[in-house]
């Protein structure tokens, strides 16, 4: 690989290295996997990325495949930011915010911009990207888009894909395209082009026409990031936009090199509150009642997570108050950020009416001040409760981001309890009750071979239970290489083929993030599990992955 590195160094503005130390640094991401790359590229421009892709394409034509993996901050939890070929590191140089149009509320930037940096910049203009992942303090905008990330505010604002206006993308052969919605007439012109972009538009148009009935069966309006979002590409007026395909594609269809995002006006002085529930029945009913009020944020946190945190000395006044009156099955945190004070006042009245006579609840509502800060801190309970003190033990992000229909949540929770008993692990649920996307972080010791095998058994049974309750395994972020085998096992064969056909159109030589969003050999996955995983990769941000 030293000859390849030398050749690329001669032709790129950015730097290429095969240093053992650097390759090791880029061999892990936020997942439990380790794959050492052949070399690492730090591109300085779209042209650098284009040259790397063109080189890999030509190499593939000669029978030598070199996988290209675009990477931001490396916070991906599914192994999608690591690979055995070339890591294209966007964080080093591709991190500029070019311009902002405050009037149209648009911002143009590169994918390596940290999410927090972008929102801090926008805040000075009275704007924000309201849909952001929990990792926004250290992850990049490009990574969030590649995963179609969502977070605590997605109940109101949707996933990050809804805030993407246009993309500049380097294709697998090195060509560069601009995405955006084009009319039927413009589509016909694109299809007439005798280049790779023309091939792609012809291929996607044919695929859409050949799969009309199948596309009608794919659920819309519920979180499901498995595969590619082909449903939102076509509209009834005959127009097409390729942007939805790249959003959530985890770098398997092209490398995003520039982004235009939509922003929203910052809302201030939100109404924040929380309710504790003594029983799971009351918890279920309470979530349903609060969901109907359409809050900006609605978070569920299992009471056992607070119990674990308090054993480490942490104190939460609301939890302590509720615990003094009895059991705490869970706490639901909510927030309303409407501009109208009247709307927030009415919401507070409705919530008070719901719970003021209940013996199963303790509730509090605040607008500002120390008590409001206390309530916001409730969301961070996972940092302590899932950070193990014992050497070797960790709570890896294996079961994060699962969608469960609200009407099936109670039955699903009971099924999870059965999994707890079977595998002798605690599986406390928490997550976004508004979008019905939940997380679970059982503890394992990955230094033990038995636990490294056990995690895949748990992941497999979890995926079966999720499907049995009408849910989706990949509702937040992507399936990557870690979850793909389990996600695709629950899909119909024709849907899996559609996923494969889309990928083949964009990457006919198979060089874009090989192994991600594809069926994987479980033995190979097990062998890639890092026994030194401890969950502390991003601990400097007080984040439990």
Image: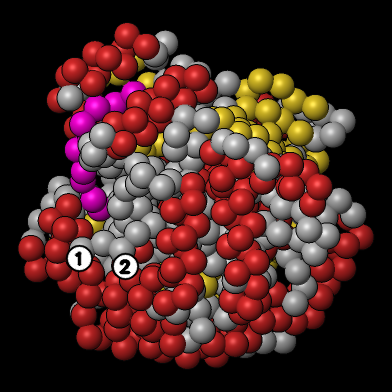
Quadrant in the picture for residue 36: top left
Q: Which residue is mark 2?
A: 485
Residue ID at (80%, 41%): 265
CB of mark 2 within 8 Å of CB of mark 1? yes
Quadrant in the picture for residue 300: bottom right
Query: Can you give x and y, in whole percent of width and height, for residue 270 in the image?
Result: 75, 52
Horizontal arrangement in the rendering, residue 403 relative to residue 23 (left or right):
right
Query: Can you give x and y, in whole percent of width and height, for residue 245 in the image?
Result: 57, 52
Question: Overall secondary structure of the magenta stretch?
Answer: loop
Image quarter in which the N terminus is found: top left
Q: Is residue 180 visible?
A: yes
Circle 2 sits in a helix, a strand or a loop, which is it? helix
Q: Which residue is mark 1?
A: 522
Q: Nearer the viewer, residue 432 or 81?
A: 81
Residue ID at (35%, 53%): 516
Horizontal arrangement in the rendering, residue 343 relative to residue 211 (left or right):
right
Q: Magenta segment, which residues?
A: 32-41
Circle 1 sits in a helix, a strand or a loop, which is it? helix
User: Magenta span has 136?
Assistant: no
């Amino acid at each position: 690989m030293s000859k390849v590195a030398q050749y690329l160094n001669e032709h790129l503005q950015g730097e290429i290295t095969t240093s053992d130390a650097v390759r090791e640094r880029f061999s892990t991401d936020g997942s439990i996997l380790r794959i050492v790359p052949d070399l690492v590229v730090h591109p300085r421009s779209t042209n650098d990325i284009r040259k790397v892709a063109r080189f890999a394409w030509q190499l593939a034509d000669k029978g030598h495949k070199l996988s290209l993996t675009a990477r931001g901050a490396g916070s991906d939890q599914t192994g999608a930011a690591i690979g055995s070929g070339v890591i294209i590191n966007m964080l080093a140089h591709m991190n500029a915010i070019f311009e902002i149009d405050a009037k149209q509320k648009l911002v143009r930037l590169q994918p390596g911009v940290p999410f927090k940096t972008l929102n801090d910049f926008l805040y000075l203009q009275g704007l924000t990207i309201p849909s952001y992942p929990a990792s926004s303090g250290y992850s990049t905008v490009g990574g969030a888009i590649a995963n179609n990330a969502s977070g605590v505010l997605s109940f109101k604002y949707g996933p990050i894909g809804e805030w993407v206006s246009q993309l500049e993308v380097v294709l697998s052969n090195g060509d560069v395209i601009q995405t955006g919605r084009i009319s039927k007439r413009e589509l016909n012109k694109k299809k007439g082009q005798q280049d790779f972009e023309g091939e792609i538009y012809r291929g996607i148009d044919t695929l859409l026409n050949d799969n009309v009935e199948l596309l009608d069966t794919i659920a819309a309006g519920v979180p499901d990031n498995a595969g590619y979002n082909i449903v939102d590409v076509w509209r009834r007026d005959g127009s097409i936009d390729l942007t939805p395909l790249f959003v959530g594609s985890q770098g398997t269809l092209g490398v995003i090199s520039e982004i235009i995002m939509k922003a929203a006006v910052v809302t201030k002085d939100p109404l924040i509150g929380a309710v504790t529930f003594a029983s799971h029945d009351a918890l279920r009913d309470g979530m349903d009642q609060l969901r109907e009020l359409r809050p900006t944020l609605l978070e569920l946190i299992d009471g056992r997570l607070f119990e674990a945190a308090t054993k480490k000395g942490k104190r939460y006044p609301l939890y302590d108050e509720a615990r003094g009156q009895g059991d705490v099955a869970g706490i639901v945190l909510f927030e309303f950020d409407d501009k109208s004070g009247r709307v927030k006042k009415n919401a507070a009245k409705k919530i008070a009416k719901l719970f003021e006579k209940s013996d199963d609840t303790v509730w509090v509502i605040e607008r500002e001040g120390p008590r409001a800060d206390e309530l916001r801190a409730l969301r961070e309970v996972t940092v302590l409760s899932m950070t193990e003190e014992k050497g070797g033990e960790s709570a890896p992000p294996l079961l994060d981001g699962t969608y469960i229909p609200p009407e099936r949540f109670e039955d699903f929770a009971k099924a999870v309890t059965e999994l707890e008993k079977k595998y002798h692990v605690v599986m406390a649920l928490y997550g976004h009750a508004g979008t019905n996307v939940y997380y679970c972080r059982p503890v394992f010791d990955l230094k033990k071979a038995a636990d490294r095998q056990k995690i895949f058994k748990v992941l497999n049974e979890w995926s079966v239970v999720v499907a049995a309750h009408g849910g989706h395994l990949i509702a937040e972020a992507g399936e990557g290489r870690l979850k793909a085998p389990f996600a695709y096992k629950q899909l119909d064969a024709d849907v899996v083929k559609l996923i494969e056909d889309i990928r083949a159109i964009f990457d006919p030589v198979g060089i874009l993030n090989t192994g991600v969003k594809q069926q994987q050999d479980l033995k190979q996955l097990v062998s890639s599990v890092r026994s030194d995983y401890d969950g502390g990769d991003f601990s400097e941000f007080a984040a439990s992955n």
